[in-house]
Image: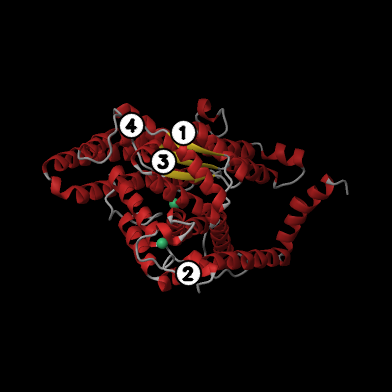
Amino acid sequence: MHLQIIVAFAMLLWWPESPPRDVWLSDPFWCPVFAWAVPVTCVFLGHIFSKRTGLRLRTRANRLSATLNSFHRKIGLLRLTMLAGVGVSLFLTACPQQLMDRPFISVLSGLPQMCLLLPYLVGLIALWWVVHPVEKASRDAGFLGSTSNRFEYVLFNVRHQLLIVAIPLTLIVFAYAATQENRDWFVKHVGSPWAPEAILGLTATVLFILSPLLLRYIWPTTSLPPGPLRDKLEALCKRINLRVRDILVWHSDGQMVNAAVMGLFPQLRYILLSDTLIEKMNDEEIESVFGHEAGHIYHHHIPYFLLFALASMLIVSAVMEFLTRMSTGLNPAWDLSRDTIQIIGIGALVPLWGICFGWISRRFERQADVYGAWCAAPHEQALNCKTPCVVHDGNESATPAAKEIRVCSTGARVFVGALRKVAFLNGIPPTEPSWRHSSIASRMAFLTAQSGDPVMARRFAQRIRAIKRTLLVSCSIGLVIAAIYIWNQPRYRQDVIRSVFRPIGRLFGQ
Ligand SMILES: [Zn+2]
Ligand SMILES: [Zn+2]
């Protein structure tokens, strides 16, 4: 969900500055009608699906999971359709130009962009409104005892799903529009033709670093009160050498069982545990879920995702540069316009993120699961581990490294239990596929299998190492090639000298 909203905002950064090209729809009446028709239709369809599913949940109690699964898929598809609608409005209709021409909208840089996004955002909110009855029915069927009414449910989702990404991204869109429209001013005062891009990059970096603070206040959270649970978690932090600013309770009004970790730096890092998670799970299970979040930090998943973003940027730039070179010059091999090349470049991002990012993310989730199981394992002595276990079976010959890879059966059982509760209480069918996390059933099966099979555990650890190495190596090679390439192109080299080196030289008074 968050990613779709990010994509919607990212599309705005490709806001066409050039005068209108040949668009598919240019009528001043039909453009806005189209922009609103997509979300309105999707919400209407969502309403019908919701009614039907609600009825099915009440009459066919034996097919609960399958019904919910299919409902979530349909709603997901509607959300994607609305997202595609934003893309069509932006790139294939005259909507952007019409918004720019309205004096009361174009008065503020960035406002036309946000107006274009408005139908999508309204559609998202309305879709939460119409799916509430199903959420309620699935809870009545025994999943999660929430007392929220429809309005609270919508508000909860707006805060958790929408605002958390929309607030920082809106700031970025405004910063981007302001720097683009006042380009000359910025260039003159900073002394570099790339000043607007640099300012935008700086804004984004600062927002990214400060995002945990933002999250703390957009989501209703409080510090976990002192008590046995806090003591246990703090002891766990000490044991695994994890530094966090605070452990927070995430108030969801009984609407979800979830945990999260936010923040690249310990000074601005929070671990969040939802109120219902704390209420419904025992201390070992909470420790294992906490351990899963800690695993993301311990295994440096966020920096590796940033590397993935860098790698995909390098690949797309390379593709676009290649196509540009083949389409320009004295005798071009192809005749591709700048717009076509841009669209191919953006198109290349879809498989990169849709397939590769999802695949890596699912592997990282499993690695965090293994770490969660490790945190929940009896760590002092083998005394508490009662099941036959590859870690605690008294085989002292294993090296410490090998022991860390192996999964304790008790730890795995605790974490699998926690996962089962997460699925059941959240009303997520265990077999429901998840692009970023993989299905809960497959995670449970994976962890159980690993705890009994040290060879499989070792193979998995090797695979993760290979993924990380590939990311590191491909980014380094890509950067070196890019640097050499830019330096060997006289035009690019001039650009870099004029836009980067000279302003920096001036800054240091040379
Ligand atoms: Zn995770
Ligand atoms: Zn064990």
Q: How far apart in space, not on screen, are marks 4 and 2 (Cα)?
A: 41 Å
Disc nearest the viewer among 3 and 4: 4
Residue at the (72%, 60%) spot, across then down: 491
Are circles 2 and 1 on residues that touch, CB within 8 Å? no
The numbered mark, 3 or 2, whose residue comes first in the sequence reads 3
Q: Which residue is mark 2?
A: 463
Q: Is residue 265 visible?
A: yes
Instruction: Give x and y (percent) for residue 225.
Output: 48, 32
The numbered mark, 4 or 2, whose residue comes first in the sequence reads 4
Instruction: Give x and y (percent) for residue 480.
Output: 67, 66
Residue furthest out toward the top? 104
Residue at the (42%, 49%) spot, across then down: 289
* Ligand 1 is within 8 Å of the C-beta of the residue at disc 4: no
Q: Which residue is mark 3?
A: 26
Secondary element at image label 3: loop
Instruction: Give x and y (percent) for residue 151.
Output: 32, 27
Secondary element at image label 2: helix
The numbered mark, 2 or 1, whose residue comes first in the sequence reads 1
The numbered mark, 1 or 3, whose residue comes first in the sequence reads 3
* Ligand 1 is within 8 Å of the C-beta of the residue at disc 2: no
Q: Amino acid under label 3?
A: Ser
